[in-house]
Image (cartoon, rainbow, N blue to C red):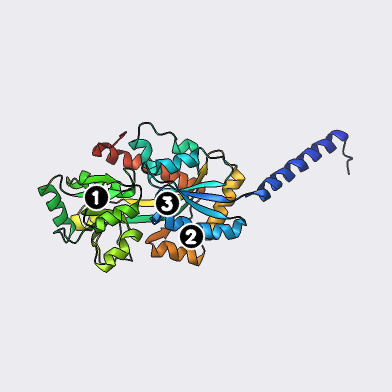
Amino acid sequence: MRKLTLKRWVLLGLLLGLSGAVAWTQTVFPTKPVKIIVPATPGGTSDIFARAIAHKLQESLGKPVVVEYKPGAATNIGTDFVAKAAPDGHTLLINGITLATNPLLFANLPFNPSKDLSPIIEVAEMLNVVTVHPSVQANNMRELVQLIKAQPGVFNHGTPGVGSSGYLSAELLWVKTGAKITHVSYQGNAQAVVDHLGGILQVGFVNLPVALQHVKSGKLKALAVTSARRSALLPEVPTVAEALGIPDFELVGWFGLLAPAKTPADVVMRLHAETLKALNDPSVIEVIQVAGGSVGGASTTQFEARIRKDTERLAAVIQASGAANK
């Protein structure tokens, strides 16, 4: 056996020290409470999912995991807050398809999602329900389209912002049918639903979990879902494609967890692993499914690819709607 020279002893010591430093870095996170920022008002879909995940992450991380709300500007206020937060894994964001579309919709965003945020994991996929207030004399999508086209400027709908999946669903309907519905921006889904229930907003393109209870109680009429397939929670409600004979109509939203860019890779991987465990927990699965979602869990690379793909896919819809760079 060859004797180690002094130079090799020094090199070995450095290598051991580095490996020990890596292990130490992995074991000290988190060092304080973790915040999940919801860029909308309480009570919406992102809030439901954030709270379910936070409960499980708190158990696995051994530190408090709290949900905070920073609504407004089509989720841009909360997203910007996280993009500028310390990249240490203690401030996270749960957001949806607006991450893909807001760069197309706003000319002077104070952040760049692809550069300033680090995707961790896709949490859930979510479809929208096309709903109308009971006062609207339409019982199916064809009747609704006819009403809207016959009375331009009369019908409106509301969403958390121009980049939301509800907004994009309405714009896609306009592009495909010529039925233009006036859009009203809200700070979150909750207030938009209140106004929809009151008839102030005649039409809704609402995340399934928010709409479901009101559809079942008869306070809203469900005309179609925006996914490619019918929902198991509303099996009697057709897809927009079925109802109107538009085979390529599909707009499905999603929600994911992200950290500030430059968050250490080992911290991102730890958060991915712990969140994946949470998403496989029966209690979290139940929350997501009851809310009308499909459980996510893809890798960080797959989640990043989805954001990029939706940005490219929806660019044409946004350009056609005239909403780009407002």
Q: Position of residue 318 (x, y in %)?
A: 29, 39
User: Label 2, on which residue?
Assistant: 52
Q: Report the front residue among 221 and 21.
A: 221
Q: Earlier in the sequence, mark 3 or mark 2?
A: 2
| Front disc: 3 or 2 | 2
Image point 32% across, 38% down: which residue? 315
Q: Is residue 219 left or right of residue 80?
A: left
Residue 157 numbered tag: 1
Residue 252 numbered tag: none
Q: Amino acid at mark 1?
A: His
C-alpha distance separating marks 2 and 1: 29 Å
CA neighbours of label 3 inside 10 A, class few (<14), some (14 to 19), many (20+): many
Q: Amino acid at mark 3?
A: Phe
Query: Is residue 309 in view?
Result: no
Q: Position of residue 29 (x, y in %)?
A: 64, 49
CA neighbours of label 2 inside 10 A, class few (<14), some (14 to 19), many (20+): some
User: Label 3, on which residue?
Assistant: 255
Q: Earlier in the sequence, mark 2 or mark 1?
A: 2
Query: Is residue 194 in view?
Result: yes
Q: Is residue 128 left or right of residue 143?
A: right
